[in-house]
Amino acid sequence: MTSIVYFLIAILALAGAGLLLWLDRQRSSVARANREVWAEAQGFDYRESDTKLRRVFRRAAMDVPDHVEVRDVAFGDYDGAEAVVFDLTETATIVAVRRKAASQVIVDLRHEDVLAPAETDVELLGAMGPRVMFSNNLEVARRVCDRRMIALANAAPPYVEVLWTEGKWALGSMPLTNDATRLDAALDVVRRFADLLRVLPPSVDPQDAPDPRDPHGPTNAELADEKTENMRDKRRREALEQSEYDPFGRTPPGPPAPARRSSPRPPAPQQQGVVPPSVQSPSVQPPPVQSPPVQPPPTQPPPTQPGWRRPGPPRSQLHPGDDQR
């Protein structure tokens, strides 16, 4: 009998769990349908979930545990600015509008009934109507608190609980809702809040090293590179120093040749009348002297003998007998 009772209790518990799961799914499907219909009316696109938004937004209402998911995302262009509307499961509905430029100054404007920010880098500035402002730079935040900001703080509906800035975005949070009227009002409030934050100083990105060719670069020698004119004069001086050995510049300058170490030589023996080779002057070769032609010795006539006659010169073949004349 007892086992039958336990069995009936288990069946009832299982049926109740199934009913709750079905109701939750029906409610989720209805919520997705309502958000999708509102997105189409605004000209937005719709997405069931998104994992990147948790890494982009981390302050104020986005400071939630990691298991909280982003659902029912509607995104598009609203009045010339990028806008995103999404839900944090069982937490809040978030409206975000992108600003023109990012700023490191944080402005947190929340309703007086909402708890103070959990972040430690912001301080209380003061109250504006039913809302209280916090900021990490009170001097800049005071310049933001003009008449238009005070009018927005008084005119914003109380269900838009927190308005804050984060990087290039202005955001607002309210309890979970799919009411089209509340979504439209929240989107308009966040858009006006983003417009009033144009006076915030933009973030300064780290700059690269200055270009040495820029004549308007910094003049501090520790921050600026060498100018083009100085580099050109420096090269000219170096080239002039290297080309001093050639005043006409016919030989291109080059790196100086390394000095050659000569091994010491033993001293040459000094001999009388011998001049060392390093001292001898170059020898001059005298012009060759032509010797006079050698004349053959005169032939002595043989002694005269009786009956001997000296022979005459040979006769010419052209004029015979001319030698007898």
Image (cartoon, helix red, strand yellow):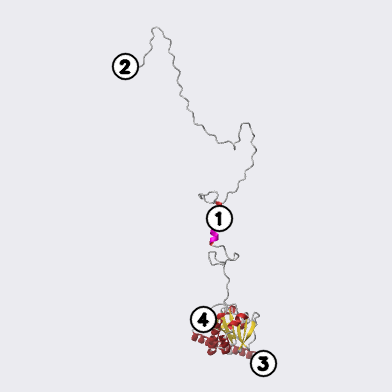
Amino acid at dot 3: Val
As drawn, 291 above or below 112:
above
The answer to whether one can see residue 171 in this image is yes
The mark that comes first in sequence, 4 or 1, is 4
Q: Which quadrant of the figure has residue 101?
A: bottom right
Q: Which type of secondary structure does the marked residue at label 4 adopt? A: strand
Which residue, given by chain and number where applicable, does mark 1 sit on?
A: 237
The mark that comes first in sequence, 2 or 4, is 4
Task: Characterize the local packing of mark 2: few (<14), some (14-19) or many (20 or more) Cα atoms within 10 angstroms.
Answer: few
What number of labels is visible? 4
Find residue 143 and report its horizontal and vertical position in percent: 59, 82
Amino acid at dot 4: Ala
The mark that comes first in sequence, 2 or 1, is 1
The mark that comes first in sequence, 3 or 4, is 3
Which residue, given by chain and number where applicable, does mark 3 sit on?
A: 5
Which residue, given by chain and number where applicable, does mark 2 sit on?
A: 322
Is residue 231 inside the magenta stretch? yes
Which residue, given by chain and number where applicable, does mark 4 sit on?
A: 81
The alpha-carbon separation of the residues under discs 4 and 1 comes to 59 Å
Q: Which label sits in the foreground, 4 or 1?
A: 1
The alpha-carbon separation of the residues under discs 3 and 4 comes to 63 Å
Quadrant where the C terminus sits is: top left
The mark that comes first in sequence, 3 or 2, is 3
The alpha-carbon separation of the residues under discs 3 and 2 comes to 186 Å
- Left or right, 248 with respect to 265, comes to left
